[in-house]
Image (tube, rainbow, N blue to C red):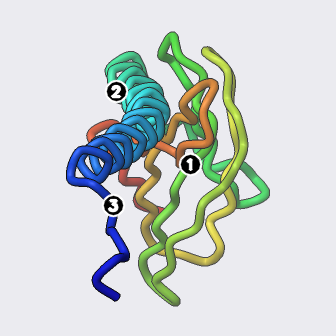
Amino acid sequence: MKNKKGISPLIATVLLIGFVVAIAAIVMLWGKGFIEERTAKEGALSKAKLDCTNINIKFIKIDESGHVVIENRGIVEVNAFKVKYYGGPDTLIEMYMSVKPLGRINIPTSGADRMDIIPAIKPKGVGAPLVPCSDKHKLVNI
């Protein structure tokens, strides 16, 4: 056993430095992709939140079939609505109906006494969730 020699300190140091450099490169490459993806999503969400300032929905009337008629008087397309029904079974429903500027949409009352209608925007180019424009909601008494 005395004649066997181990690895020299110089080779051990070079191997350790090589492992550290390889691990650092892997972490940096993964982090770069992660940061770029996160930045793109956050940028799209911020733009959608900014677009909320250009939304103006207006309650028009309740039509003969018992639907609430809402008009988009803003300059941005509304991609969906979150509707909270009050009176009877209180529920929150997401309705994926797009309304272009100056377009109208009919939302069923579902036997509710009041409805809180919240417009939502879908960010472009990413798989991000809908961005509700809560400050642009309309409370409709039926």
Is 90 situated left or right of 11 in this image?
right
Residue nearer the viewer, 24 or 55: 24
* Mark 3 or 2, nearer chain start: 3
Q: Which residue is mark 1?
A: 81
For label 1, count other residues whose C-alpha is less than 10 Å away and answer few (under 14), some (14-19) or many (20+): many
Q: Quadrant of the N terminus?
A: bottom left
Amino acid type at image mark 1? Phe
Q: Circles 1 and 2: CB distance less than 8 Å?
A: no
Residue displayed at 56% across by 48% down: 81
What percent of the width, then of the height, locates residue 95?
66, 55
Residue displayed at 63% across by 36% down: 79
Task: Give me the C-alpha separation between circle 1 and circle 3.
Answer: 69 Å
Give the answer, above or below, for where 13 lies relative to 103. below
Amino acid type at image mark 2? Ser
Amino acid type at image mark 3? Ile
Q: Which residue is mark 3?
A: 7
What percent of the width, then of the height, locates residue 3?
34, 77
Look at discs 1 and 3 and give the one toward the viewer: 3
The answer, for residue 29, to whether it is visible in the render is yes
Task: Give me the C-alpha separation between circle 3 and circle 2.
Answer: 56 Å
Task: Give me the C-alpha separation between circle 1 and circle 2.
Answer: 19 Å
For label 2, count other residues whose C-alpha is less than 10 Å away and answer few (under 14), some (14-19) or many (20+): some
What percent of the width, then of the height, locates residue 58?
46, 31
Q: Which residue is mark 2?
A: 46
